[in-house]
Amino acid sequence: MMSQAVRNLTVFVLLCHLLVSITGAPPDAVFDQSTLREGVDEPVQKWGYVEVRPHAHMFWWLYRTTAKEGYMNRPLVIWLQGGPGASGTGFGNFQELGPEDINQNARNTTWVSRANVMFIDNPVGTGYSYVTSDDAYTTDVAQIADDLVFLFKEFSKAYPEFQKIPLYIFCESYGGKMTAAFAQALYKSINHGDVHANFKGVALGDSWISPVDYVMTWGPYLYATSLVETESLARITAVADQCRTAYFAGNYTQSTALWSKLEGVINQETGGVNFYNILKWGQSDFSKQKAQSNSYLSELYNRHVAPMANDALSEFMNGPMRKKLTVIPKNVTWGGQSGEVFAKQSGDFMKPVIDIVADLLSNTDLQVVVFNGQLDLICDTMGTELWVQRLSWPGLEAYNAAPRKPLTDRNQVPWGYLKQHKNFSFYWVLGAGHMVPQDVGEAALTMLEMIIG
């Protein structure tokens, strides 16, 4: 006669086999994999899935640092990509700051040389993350934050050594909006004792914190950089005003549609400016659209998410990387659900999170860093400076009075500027567009070191 323990084990094994037959992969768990080879200086890597909710499976990928101090003596940096729907394990990893590019050549400005770096395909449906039910997609940043907190909770339980290592969240674009909400929820969970982590701060890179402030500064920025003249500026301003009016009337979906219309006007008036770097002519986001559609959401997705999942990157992630990772279910394609991810967030897309950033600043033990590329249009520096002035933060007046200091390279050539007060810092990054680590790798690495110590 079987003991109760044996019966329980038998039931568990049967359930595992059932899940494998359904998904083509083992049940979601924190999956340990090492690629460290004897005599080869490359980072130990770990990756896996966490089922953050029923039918919602989120993928993460960790690189232990190659710093000589050892990974236990260096911080953990979580990187969140934008979109929403752009893959951090793909774009952020192989085209911005991971240890290798898509040709598997070493990147000499990789952040893994200074910190443990964790990429997350977020929200669910992005990259290798996937859902098995339409109602499992997220529709706002609050839901996104809850999923991320759950994932990190499971990760830190599986790898308790990371509970004491200093933790920072870095991001880009819409990832900044998600980071603000994630950081707020994580901080509360840590204080309640639900999550154990040594949370030190956030760094919001070219982040979609206040969409209306960006919309209203697009015209003046283009005019100041000689990309439009007076009549063009008037046409751009007219549509921007419509977008702002819809937002303040609470018509958020209409505001998103007008945002799409405004981009079309700017594209026409400038002759195809690149929204991510105004100096990269001939690389217009509009020219990269993969399909024509009458849906403004499809147009926005094709401008701002699809170009990141370009053919070369898609083939790489669905080819050699998929084979390496082994845990990707057979029916899951990298990036295959990202269009739905973007569409599901459309009602929340134009809503700001300035109040969340202010709340983070109220926690004096948290660093709050903002950094912005000089050549970015979509999240231009003018718009970022505007929303910073809207922060309900007692230290704002003192921050405004603080000196702005130049940051120079080894040849004493400025690569940026820094203004700080207490736990708030603002980095202006010269020569960079929207993707700071991609455009100015050395400056981005220097900034990382300054922030994490």
Image (cartoon, rainbow, N blue to C red):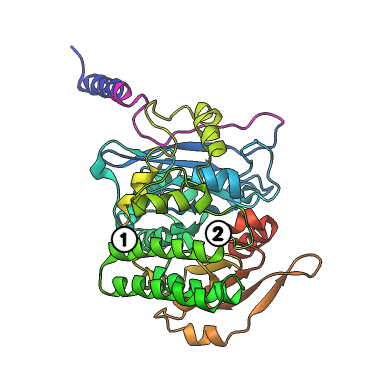
Q: Amino acid at mark 1?
A: Asp
Number of the front mark, 2 or 1: 2
Instruction: Indicate the position of residue 300 as horizontal and vertical percent values.
Output: 41, 54
**Boundaries of the magenta span:** 19-39
Location of the C terminus by quadrant is bottom right
Mark 2 belongs to which amino acid? Answer: Gly
Rendered residue at 57%/37% (across/down): 312
Can residue 387 be seen at all in this image of the molecule?
yes
Q: Main secondary structure of the magenta part?
A: loop
Q: Is residue 71 left or right of residue 28?
A: right
**Dot 2 alpha-carbon crowd within 10 angstroms: few under 14, some 14 to 19, many 20 or more:** some
- Location of residue 402 in the rendering, given as x and y in whole percent from the top left corner: 59, 85
- SS at mark 1 in the image: loop
Q: Residue at x 25, y 38 (%)?
A: 133
Q: Which mark is residue 348?
A: 1
Q: Is residue 236 above or below residue 389?
A: above
| Separation of residues labelled 2 and 1 (CA atoms) | 27 Å
**Does the magenta-highlighted stretch encompass residue 22?**
yes
Callout 1: 10 Å neighbours few (<14), some, many (20+)?
A: some
Is 333 on the left-hand or right-hand side of 22?
right
**Quadrant the N terminus occupies:** top left
Which label was assigned to residue 272?
2
